[in-house]
Image (cartoon, rainbow, N blue to C red):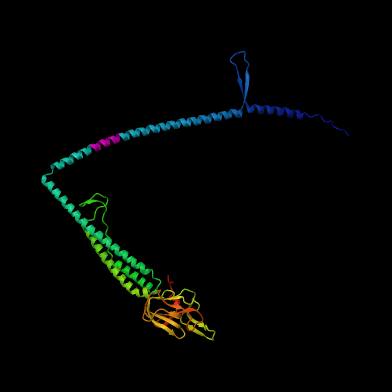
Amino acid sequence: MFFRRKEPSTRPAVKKVSEFINTKSHNQKKYISLMLVPSYSTGKTRSLRIPRAVLYSVAIVFFLIFSVVMGFYLNSRYQQQVAANLSNSLDETQAAFSTYRYESEQAQSELIDATVQMYEQLSEEQMRARLEIDRQERRHQDTLDDIWDIIDGLEDQIREFEEERQEIISNLSSRSVIPPIANLLSEMEKTQENLREALMPEIIPAKPSAPSVGFLSFGAQAPLTEGEILNRLNSLVNELEAQRQMLVSLEEYKERMQPYLLNYPTIWPVRGQISSGYGWRRNPFGGSGSEFHYGIDIPAKVGTPIRASGGGTVIFACWQNGYGNVIEIDHGSGLTTKYAHNTRNSATVGQRVERGDIIAYVGSTGRSTGSHLHYEVRRNDTALNPVSFLLEFHN
């Protein structure tokens, strides 16, 4: 068996030499060498190595500074040019204004001279005629002012009528909780609207606020002509008549509502919870069967005041079997109310009572299981559910 002797390799040495050469070449690329030659012959020549990155940075900074300086310079030159143009334009405008001012002064002077010359040429007769015309115009204006005073008076009167009408409507509307009044109010509103559409004239423009002499106005709005003023006057007269008719209609409706305003049974005779309602119920005394309850029962302490639920005339104030002490009031329009089981009655037959007046006191007389008020409402002697009438409490 033969073994080959390995020869020592030269590759590592070659590799080291190559790396050295590359490193040196790379270092040379990173720097720029400057040779400094002295001005005298005996001096030594020196070499200055400057990193390329530093040199490039200095060059870029220098370029940026140069660009900024040039930008400011060019901008200042532009601004100077704009200022020069504006100055020239201002000078031209000022010169044109001076020329225009001079020409306007000349024209004004010529106009004044022409006016003076025109008045000097007027004869004495023409001057008297002009003065007479001015006097008639002033008298005419005084007459128009008197007419406007009449118009202002009519407008004030119409305004008062409208305020009175609105007050009546507001007062009546406050009682719209009463069903008959609510129906009449609806009918009244339609009637008022129909009257307004049929009788209200077209609105004529009001008096202009600009001062005027004769037919000449010194304001932006020209005064009305005589025909327009007369139309305005006639319009107000018609409107005043319409307001009068509307007020008459309101009074008629108010008169129709008056019985309901005074007499309709709307308030609770006593405050409290209803213990037994209107209609069929079991025998309250524990017996068998049921009975029809013609009113409502409102429990209250003995002696609690009972108030009239509406205005009317007392037609019964006595003892009645089963009801005990009873008060019965006729409210008109076929409506009557009954207040039963009273401990005592304070109203008498034939007496006129108003809504909210005390007419009796709560008790337990007659066929009663305890202290309470039995309250009935009837129309033409037919019992109705009282709950539909109880709309408010007495203050």
- Report if residue 247 is visible in the image: yes
In x, y percent, where is residue 274?
Answer: 49, 76
In x, y percent, where is residue 125?
Answer: 11, 47
Is residue 100 found inside the magenta-colored segment of the image? yes
Q: Viewer-proximal residue, 189 or 99?
A: 189
Q: Residue at x 11, y 45 (%)?
A: 124
**Height in image: 34 above or below 94?**
above
Q: Quadrant of the C terminus?
A: bottom left
Q: Residue at x 19, y 54 (%)?
A: 142
Quadrant position of residue 311: bottom left
Magenta part, dominant SS: helix
Q: How many marks?
A: 0
Residue 115 is left or right of residue 282, and the answer is left
In x, y percent, where is residue 354?
Answer: 38, 75
Residue farthest to the right? 1
Q: Quadrant of the N terminus?
A: top right
- Report if residue 228 is visible in the image: no
Q: Viewer-proximal residue, 7 or 310?
A: 310
Quadrant position of residue 305: bottom left
**Height in image: 167 above or below 111?**
below
Is residue 328 found inside the magenta-colored segment of the image? no
Magenta region: 95-105
Q: Residue at x 34, y 74 (%)?
A: 258
